Image (spheres, rainbow, N blue to C red):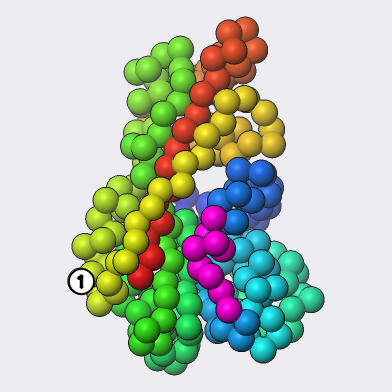
Amino acid sequence: MNDTPSVAEQFGGDAARRLEAMYLTPDIVAQRAAVLDRLRLQLGERVLDIGSGPGLLAASMAEQVGARGEIRGVDVSDTMVGLATARCSAFGWAGFQVADATSLPFADDSFDVVACTQVLEYVPDVEGAIAELRRVLRPGGRALIMDTDWQSCLWASSDDARMRRMLEVWDTHCAQPRLPRLLCGLLGRGGLEVRRVSTLPLINLAWSADTYSHGIAHAIAAFVGKSGLVPALMAEQWLEDFWVLAGTRNRYFFSLDRFMFET
Ligand SMILES: C[S@@+](CC[C@H](N)C(=O)[O-])C[C@H]1O[C@@H](n2cnc3c(N)ncnc32)[C@H](O)[C@@H]1O
């Protein structure tokens, strides 16, 4: 039996708060800084954040565009919209609402900039989402899209076959597990010219609670453990292995690439 949770389940309730904690680790703080660096926001710009999650990127963007600018965020999870609204309450020019990336509640050409980080990989109708992104972006506006391909993951393990199986099942947590290698073509066919593609590596050399890989390992173990696709103990033993590798042999190693597309 494969009980893949819906996107709303994956990003609602306590899962939203766990993701928020993971997105506050230094690894993801640095990732956001890299995204902001590439966005080069100007005072007064109107920005849309598609799949705005807990609003951490939106809060930084609100500071950068200032009160004469505008930040709008949409997300399918109402818990995420609540977290983002609370986080940005000091910025009267930032607002969030529940909406799907494939049906944006905005007029054509509404935004100077659109950001969509770690979201399109969860959208089954990715062409529809790209069409909507382009529709609301003004001619000459800028978009930044970031996604992950877990085949870029290098993760030390005492059992390579088990690691492969865990990541194979984890691939089923999203609709588009290989999206980065398809995105240039999809964006181009959607009328968005890709000007730059870059990678952003996340590297952890320690098994420690304030790292991205510690947080995502627990999310993977919970997801795969509940999937019914592997023996019940496999996920637990896989997780335990990181502690053993790090503690007894100083052999913990994790690396994963994010891919950023700028139009
Ligand atoms: C991994 S989080 C990334 C959050 C945020 N963009 C960031 O980078 O900090 C993915 C977010 O996308 C949202 N999401 C997934 N599918 C969506 C869709 N079809 N439309 C809008 N939001 C979606 C989820 O609810 C979740 O908040």
The residue identified by callout 1 is 189
- The location of residue 99, given as percent across then percent down, is 50, 76
Q: Quadrant of residue 213?
A: top right
Tell me: 198 left or right of 23: left
Foreground residue among 157 and 252: 252
Few, some or many residues within 10 Å of mark 1 (<14, 14–19, 20+): few
Residue occupying image coordinates x 38% and y 65%: 262
Judge whether residue 185 can be spotted in this image.
yes
Residue occupying image coordinates x 79% and y 76%: 90
- The location of residue 131, given as percent across then percent down, is 31, 77
Judge whether residue 127 can be spotted in this image.
no
Residue that extends furthest to the top in the rendered view of this protein: 248
Residue occupying image coordinates x 30% and y 67%: 194
Residue that extends furthest to the right in the rendered view of this protein: 90
Residue occupying image coordinates x 62% and y 25%: 206
Say which amino acid is labelled 1.
Arg
Q: Is residue 40 magenta?
A: yes
Q: Is residue 44 magenta?
A: no
Chief SS of the magenta region: helix
* Location of the C terminus (image quadrant): bottom left
When the figure is inspected, residue 208 is found, relative to residue 126, above or below; the finding is above
- The location of residue 169, given as percent across then percent down, is 38, 35
When the figure is inspected, residue 96 is found, relative to residue 221, above or below; the finding is below
Foreground residue among 122 and 201: 201
State the count of labels. 1
Q: Which residues are magenta?
A: 34-42
Tell me: 129 left or right of 223: left
